[in-house]
């Protein structure tokens, strides 16, 4: 780790990280060795709530095998993680449900942080409605755009005449979320803005509860959170012009669930790879991303080819900092 990075991290208190990041799940939060001077070894991860279930499962497996290592995993949203923690040099790893933006790369560069990108899975971003919404099973991309764009439809019958004359109750990710960014770009489009009159949160299970609680609700989030709740909310099939396709691991893997299949990422600070604990954890993370652990939490594992690409990239980055 560079002296500059160490200095920046030493300025970041444990209380500040937990309060600002809102740690949702932590394996072994007993101190941060490189940041706080504890004898224990530490890996700090922030970022995407969509990728969180993968990172949480990997961290749990890793700390069982390495009980002297503390791995903290927090949900801050992809953008919130980049801008508030990773690019300022306060975390080692940032999970992301969309690629890092140019402005974020610039912020990282200004702080001496060099992000290394790895693909860790594939998601079938899922639109859900209340389980009692028996009038809707499939929607076109344009219909979804009408629902979610600023100044768009107000009630279900604005989309199709035969649907109820009832207003939408909408739930979705906050603007710091990579899922928000991906949905805005893919569904709403560059010509329109995403509407802001909806219940926004970085807690995907809050979206589930909101949709479950209103017959006329709609929301969207990563497939893993739908796979936890298939009996309480209903997934909407998407028609991109080639017919209705339901979200699933199979359709995401095949590439037939369009346009909401997307790669999931983790970004590692190259400077952090100078630390043996971080690079050992990252290698473990990448290897686990090619296993059933990923499908068990609700995503498609990476292929052996992608794993090889990830490991080659990791080896090259490690060589640069040693």
Image (tube, rainbow, N blue to C red):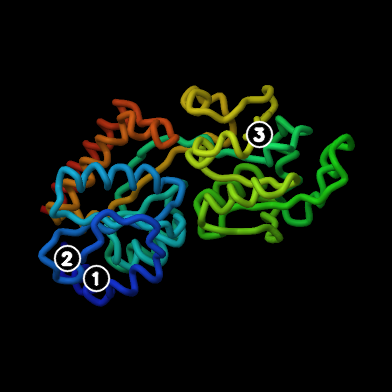
Are the residues at dot 2 and dot 1 in contact (C-beta closer than 8 Å)?
yes
**Left or right: where does residue 49 sit relative to residue 27?**
right
178 is higher (above) or lower (below) than 223: below
Q: Which mark is residue 68?
A: none
Residue 321 place in picture, x, y as percent:
15, 54
Q: Nearer the viewer, mark 3 or mark 2?
A: 3
Q: Quadrant of residue 242?
A: top right
- Where does label 2 land, which residue? 34
- Crowdedness near tag 2: few (<14), some (14–19) or many (≥20) residues, C-alpha within 10 Å: some
- Where does label 1 land, which residue? 9
Q: Nearer the viewer, mark 1 or mark 3?
A: 3
Q: Residue at x 56, y 58 (%)?
A: 201
- Crowdedness near tag 3: few (<14), some (14–19) or many (≥20) residues, C-alpha within 10 Å: many
Q: Secondary structure at mark 3?
A: loop
Front residue of 101/24: it is: 24
Q: Residue at x 53, y 48 (%)?
A: 179
Tell me which label, 1 or 3, sits earlier in the chain. 1
Are the residues at dot 1 and dot 3 in contact (C-beta closer than 8 Å)?
no
Residue 261 place in picture, x, y as percent:
52, 34
Q: CA distance from mark 1 to mark 3?
A: 44 Å
67 is higher (above) or lower (below) than 23: above
Q: Secondary structure at mark 1?
A: helix
Q: Quadrant of the N terminus?
A: bottom left
Tell me which label, 2 or 1, sits earlier in the chain. 1
Q: Secondary structure at mark 2?
A: helix
**Left or right: where does residue 264 sit relative to residue 257?**
left
């Amino acid at each position: 780790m560079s002296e500059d990075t160490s200095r920046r991290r030493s300025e970041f208190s444990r209380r500040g990280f937990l309060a600002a990041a809102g740690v949702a799940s932590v394996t072994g939060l007993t101190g941060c060795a490189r940041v706080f001077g504890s004898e224990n070894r530490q890996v700090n991860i922030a970022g995407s709530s969509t990728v969180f279930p993968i990172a949480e499962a990997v961290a749990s497996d890793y700390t069982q095998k390495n009980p002297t290592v503390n791995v903290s995993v927090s949900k801050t949203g992809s953008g919130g993680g980049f801008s508030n923690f990773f690019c300022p040099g306060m975390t080692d790893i940032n999970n992301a449900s969309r690629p890092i933006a140019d402005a974020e790369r610039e912020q990282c560069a200004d702080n001496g942080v060099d992000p290394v990108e790895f693909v860790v899975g594939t998601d079938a971003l899922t639109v859900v409605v209340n389980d009692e919404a028996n009038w809707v099973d499939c929607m076109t991309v344009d219909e979804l755009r009408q629902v979610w764009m600023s100044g768009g439809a107000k009630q279900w019958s604005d989309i199709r005449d035969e649907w109820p004359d009832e207003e939408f109750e909408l739930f979705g990710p906050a603007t710091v979320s990579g899922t928000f960014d991906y949905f805005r770009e893919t569904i709403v489009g560059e010509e329109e803005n995403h509407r802001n009159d909806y219940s926004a949160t970085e807690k995907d299970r809050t979206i589930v509860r909101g949709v479950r609680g209103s017959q006329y609700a709609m929301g969207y989030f990563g497939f893993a959170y739908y796979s936890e709740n298939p009996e309480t909310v209903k997934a909407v099939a998407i028609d991109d012009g080639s017919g209705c396709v339901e979200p699933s691991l199979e359709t995401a893997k095949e590439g037939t669930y369009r346009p909401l299949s997307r790669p999931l990422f983790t970004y590692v600070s190259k400077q952090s790879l100078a630390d043996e604990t971080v690079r050992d954890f990252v290698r473990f993370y990448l290897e686990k991303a090619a296993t059933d652990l990923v499908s068990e939490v609700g995503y498609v594992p990476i292929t052996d080819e992608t794993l090889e690409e990830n490991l080659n990239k990791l080896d090259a980055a490690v060589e640069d900092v040693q």
